[in-house]
Image (cartoon, rainbow, N blue to C red):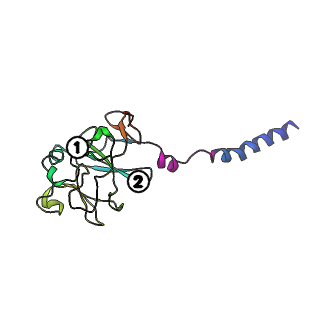
Amino acid sequence: MAATAGVGAIAAVGVATPFVASFTPSERAKAAGAPVEVDLSKLQPGEKMTVEWQGKPVWILRRTPEMLASLKGAEDRLVDPKSEAPQQPAYVKGEARAIKPEYFVCIGICTHLGCSPSDKLKKGAESGMGESWPGGFLCPCHGSQFDLAGRVFKSMPAPSNLVIPPHTYLSDTRLLIGEDSKGA
């Protein structure tokens, strides 16, 4: 009788394990709403990576000193050059729109109709955008143009800058998207 009870207990555990495991959220479900931790250690200057947070693409661009310099002097060509519209946490206002100027973090969705802009990171004619292009992003759907801080140029279909998600740095090479340490 003890053997039968033991076999029954083992069978019950075997049946219950998948049932209980089904209550644990999948990795995809966790990524859909939970904060996402990102390792920046392999991201080289001038490179961009994309991660998913809440089902949206989040871009992380490691800007070079030349890229940062291109953010100055275009204020008269931008809709919201100081990022004063409420599209980002208060701690990323200004021309760089970043906690650490070297790293630009934004949601990679155009604020016009939700297309994903293309990289046009190179300056000038090398980007295919003309000699005066400072580097940035081009929305292929309706032509909206954004600089390397996601600020939209005037007279574009997009009404506002690219959105900045809440984020914080856990260390020099670890970024947490979806939470911030500033309470914003």
In the picture as drawn, the residue positioned furthest to the left comes out as 131
Q: Which residue is mark 2?
A: 56
| Towards the viewer: 25 or 161 | 161
Mark with earlier residue (2, 1): 2
Residue situated in front as seen by the camera: 27 or 147: 147
Which residue occupies 11% across, 58% down? 132
Above/below status of 83 relative to 170 = below
Q: Quadrant of the C terminus?
A: top left
The answer for how far apart the CA atoms under marks 2 and 1 are is: 22 Å
Asked whether residue 33 is drawn in magenta, I would say: yes
Left or right: 109 in relation to 126: right
Residue at 28% x, 57% y is 159
The disc labelled 1 sits on which kind of residue? Ala
The disc labelled 2 sits on which kind of residue? Lys
Q: Position of residue 50 (x, y in %)?
A: 35, 51
Q: Residue at x 72, y 47 (%)?
A: 15
Q: Does residue 130 appear left or right of residue 152 in this picture? A: left
Label 2 CA crowd tier, 10 Å (few <14, some 14–19, many 20+)? few
Label 2: element kind: strand
Q: Residue furthest front?
A: 85
Q: Is residue 140 above or below residue 184?
A: below
Q: Position of residue 130 (x, y in %)?
A: 13, 63
From the image, tell me which residue sits under label 1: 96
Q: Residue furthest bottom?
A: 141
SS at mark 1 in the image: loop
Residue 119's x, y, as percent? Answer: 26, 57
* Direction from residue 166 to residue 78 in the image, left or right: left
Question: In which quarter of the view is residue 17 placed?
Answer: top right
Residues rendered magenta in the picture:
21-35
